[in-house]
Amino acid sequence: MIYVIYESLDTANVYNFGESERFLGDYVSDKRSDVVVATKYTINTTAMQTDKRLNPNFGGNHRKSLVENLNESLKRLNMSYIDILYVHAFEYRTPIEEIMRSLDDVVRSGKVLYIAASDVPFWVLTRSNTIAELRGWRVIINYAEDEKKLGILDEVIAISKETPVQVAMNWVQQKPGITSSLIAAGSAT
């Protein structure tokens, strides 16, 4: 599976067991300077292979997983660098500081030009970039949201255009521990 996003080509280490990266590498080999190539890491490639033992070093956001998956992706893509490397998902075990420092290191090494995130909570994104800015590391330049979540957001926006107070009150009622809400009238255009 390869997604074309605004003149960039996007894949991941696990799409079609890595064959997606091989295909993409072959496809752009004669026009590498004309395209932006993005790939993702985090998902454990050995978890889907029945003929291999699960290797915890090939999954997660920790430094070892990043290094192993990045090197394998570069081999499959037959490239010396990746334009955009995405953190595919946030797995809640690796400290944000380790993730951001490791990503900064691969950018400084020249193997990656930019870093991005896909399907991570917004609080993780903002905390990650705050830490990176304070320490002089590279920040996440792009965020790809899960299409299902965007569909839900579209529904909430559609409902809120008609009855924003009802949407807010319903949300408050479903959150134990929230005892009051602040609702203001206004328009967001």
Image (cartoon, helix red, strand yellow):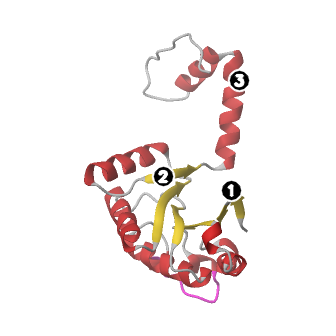
Q: Secondary structure at mark 1?
A: strand
Q: Which residue position is annotated with label 2?
A: 141
Q: Residue at x 68, y 75 (%)?
A: 28
Query: Measured along the vertical axis of the image, is residue 112 above or below residue 100?
Result: below
Q: Residues within 10 Å of mark 2 (few under 14, many from 20)?
A: few
Q: Which residue position is annotated with label 3?
A: 159
Q: Does residue 164 appear to the left or right of 92 in the view shown?
A: right
Q: Amino acid at mark 3?
A: Ile
Q: Does residue 50 appear to the left or right of 101 in the view shown?
A: right
Q: Does residue 184 appear to the left or right of 16 in the view shown?
A: left
- Circle nearer the viewer, 3 or 1: 1
- Whether 54 is among the magenta residues is yes
* Residue extending furthest toward the left: 135
Q: Secondary structure at mark 3?
A: helix
Q: Amino acid at mark 1?
A: Ile
Give percent across and percent down for residue 50.
64, 84
Q: CA distance from mark 3 to mark 1?
A: 29 Å
Q: Residue at x 49, y 81 (%)?
A: 71
Query: Measured along the vertical axis of the image, is residue 40 above or below residue 122?
Result: below
Q: Earlier in the sequence, mark 1 or mark 2?
A: 1
Q: Which residues are magenta?
A: 49-56
Q: Earlier in the sequence, mark 3 or mark 1?
A: 1
Give percent across and percent down for residue 157.
67, 27
Q: Main secondary structure of the magenta part?
A: loop
Q: Amino acid at mark 2?
A: Ile
Q: Residues within 10 Å of mark 1 (few under 14, many from 20)?
A: few
Q: Which residue position is annotated with label 1?
A: 5
